[in-house]
Image (spheres, grey):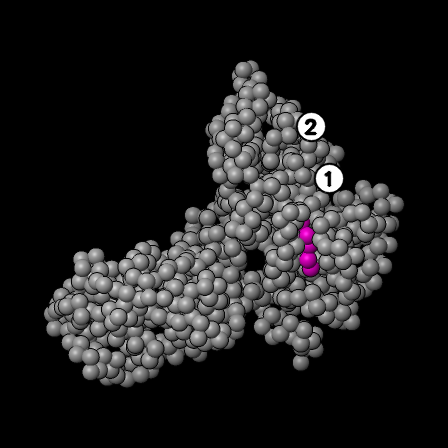
Amino acid sequence: MSLADFKYADTIHRCFRCGYCKFPVNWKDVNNCPPYARFRMESYSCGGRLWLTRAWLNDQIKWTEHLAEILYSCTTCKNCVIKCPLRFNVDIVNMVIAARGEMVESGRLPQAVKKFLENIELYGNPYGESRAKRGEWANRMGVEKYHGQEYLLYVGCTGSYDTRAQKAARALAEIMMRAGVSFGVLGPEETCDGNEVYKLGESGLFEVLAENNIQKYKNTGAQKIVTFSPHAYNAMKNYYHEYGGSFEVFHYTQFLHGLIENGKINNLRCPNMKITFHDPCFLGRWNEEYEAPRAILRAVEGVEFTEMGKNKESALCCGGGGGNFQIDLLGGSENSPARRRAREAYETGANVLAVACPKCLVMLNDAVESEELANRLEVLDISEIVIKGLNI
Amino acid sequence: MDSIYEALVNIVGKEYVSNQPEELYIYSFDLGTAEPCQPQYVVSPRATEHIQGIVRLANKEKIPIVPLGGGLSLAGLAVPLKGGILLDLKRMDSIIEVNENARYAVVECGVSQGQLTSYLEKNYPRLTHSEPGAPPAATLAGNVMIHGQGDLAQPYGFNSDLVNGLEVVLPTGEVCHIGSVAIGAGWFTNHPLPDVGLFLGWCGTTGIITKLSIRLFPCKRIRGVGTFVLEHEDLVPEAVYKLTHTQMAEDIVAFSSAIPPFASELQQITVNIAADSEKELEFKQEILWDDTLGEYIHRGEGAYLGFVRHLQRPQISKTSDYKKGGGFEYVGSIVPIQRYPECYRKGREISERHGIPYTVTGRCVGAGHSMMFAWTFAFNRADPETIIQARKALHETDDLVLQLGGVIWKPGTYGQKLILERLDPGTKELMGKIKRLIDPNGIMNPGNWEVA
């Protein structure tokens, strides 16, 4: 493809590389673009990616594995969209996704991205795990299979397969059961929501996933879906309608907040917890939901809540978005976004770092361990905090 | 095996060295109209010792070094004109000290303007620094290196006048300190030791600034900007002179632009005002608008457009998107304020000749001692012809500055050539001697200030 055929050919040159996109809202540092924070080379900045994309499509530079890694290191966290003051800002991440789409089309991808997509196609999850094991996280919990209950709980790949995230998924299911919510899960019939597939530029595979999922939900009669992951929430809320999806979608924090408000969950108590909260990109910047998780934490008696300096639309991404949870182009350094974020959380004096995303949970849990902070800062999903509150 | 690459890796670590086409491409560009030139290596040091090691290596290998701060000069000053090692200094970004009582900050060379603004707002709300109109990613060291000016230029002058001290890696690898810190007395003053100020304005051709101390100033509780408009450019110098006499403004900027069309040809003057109380604010506003500029209103030559509380800091620039083209560059000049009308008229002629909507700005420096006057030319990065037109316009404007009796501010290579042609022979010889002595292998940002 030439630049002229690129969807954003009339826009991509408008990036001046002024660098606003590196900052959080309060201009605290230039480390709010995850790949730039990790590598600190202009090539990894948002502007660098756009200029390199244009140069590649203009045949000024050739495709290399390194170029592909630079483009795929973007976590699609949308900090650049928030910070860029120019009118084309809404398309910045879309330009990166479109460039990745070109790489997908031509089959020139980093090995880890290839493997990710291959696993999704073969197994319906990026782990390459058997579909049959997808529902094992709920073994012996008594969670019902979905058969027309009011809510379908969509757990997603990370909550289904990652052992740390499974604990949080179990906490959520237990809360829902104890609150008397009518819900079920698809278990082994659940398939990847496709959010990361979309962000990796594989629009064709995303379309297949979306259509199949929508058909499955229609066949089962699901009208209301609660997602454990903000990534799934984003895909189902913002993209599935293009493929005929017409159900209500809630992120679980919105749902739990509703349960607290109508008294189905009450008497939450967690003494001696000083909590700070990490906003997931796909709940916050992508869907502007900043309040529900905080409202839940405020409802827990005994919790002292403190904000990180970079919060809400300024939150530093954990580095797990845009497929990087698996393809891991940003790991392996004290400058990895997750480790930076863990330090930022620790600086608040909190003893609990609350999250509302299974990817953030795993990324930050690992980061806290790498930073040797595990005995001083516990990473807990909000579902785990609520279940602790209920148990006391 | 590339031995220079290996040596660089040994100094800063593998992750912070690149000789791959992607980094060489990105770092070959200035954001303005300068032609790209590729380095052979891009290196991102974290410590003064790293820079010393790199400089020593470069001397041994006789390979150029080009230091880069925020990369926002727009004049091509950090384009590696003769290749070599591009030093991206932004990883050296620690704020080392803020002395609240003596009002200064010591920072590493990669600290950005936005970072210091944010840090002071959070930790020292009674202090502020003179923040330039550049994007917040511009570094403090880069700004003082080019004799930048900020939003406190009217009371306090150029930002390079506000330097209390420097740490510099010399072109041969030694570290030296300038100012009171040189005798271990802290970073509170640049005086009164013998003047060895060989680094500011040299564009990295005499050394690499690694740390600097910059003066801070009282930050009043209320800050805002008032706007006054004058119908004719000839009125601007007198109005600015009167404003400076009040000693009540933090920043005085006159500007005019073709866009929006209804305001074209009008001259707007923004005045930043700060106060600790409503009483002080009211008093200053009365003095500035009523007593000082009121006469223009009475004569029907001007109008007061209002006062907006809260300064937008850092300033957000959208100039690059004026033509949806992603590019602009400007010629800056330091000129007497009395030249404002000619600067405006001739700059506008040049813009119109090249089919570019005109934008001119003049910031008062000191108590009317001079003005930084800038002519801005937007271009479309996707249309090479507009880049060529902008470049021609910029070169014509460089010539114009000197014709008007001004000095080109942060000149690119074209402007440097014009200045060197006019430079006092004795001064030029001195610069040559300094350069030959301090940088015997000519490795420091070659192509800039070629006097040796």
| Magenta span | B210-214
Q: Is residue B20 left or right of residue B183?
A: left
Out of B334 and B449, give the one closest to the viewer.
Answer: B334
Using a 10 Å C-alpha cutoff, classify the residue at mark 1 as few (fewer than 14 neighbours), some (14 to 19) or many (20 or more).
Answer: many
The image position of residue B28, as x and y in percent, is 62, 60
Same subunit, labels 1 and 2: the answer reads yes
Mark 1 belongs to chain: B
Out of A170 and B231, give the one closest to the viewer.
Answer: A170
Residue at x 26%, y 80% (from the top left corner): A137
- Which three-letter amino acid code belongs to the residue tagged 2? Gln
Number of residue marks? 2
> Element under label 2?
helix
| Chain-order first, disc 1 or disc 2 | 2
Distance from the alpha carbon under mark 1 to that under mark 2: 14 Å
The image position of residue A262, as x and y in percent, is 18, 57
- Which three-letter amino acid code belongs to the residue tagged 1? Val
Instruction: Check residue B203 in the rendering and tell me which mark sits there, or answer none.
Output: none
Residue positioned most to the top: B299
> Element under label 1?
strand
User: Can you say whether B403 is above or below B70 in the image?
Assistant: above
Residue A331 visible here: no
Instruction: Check residue B338 in the rendering and tell me which mark sits there, or answer none.
Output: 2
> Quarter of the image containing the N terminus of chain B?
bottom right
Whether residue B211 is in magenta: the answer is: yes
* Residue with the mark numbered 1: B407
Using a 10 Å C-alpha cutoff, classify the residue at mark 2 as few (fewer than 14 neighbours), some (14 to 19) or many (20 or more).
Answer: some
Whether residue B307 is in magenta: the answer is: no
Residue at x 63%, y 66% (from the top left corner): B46
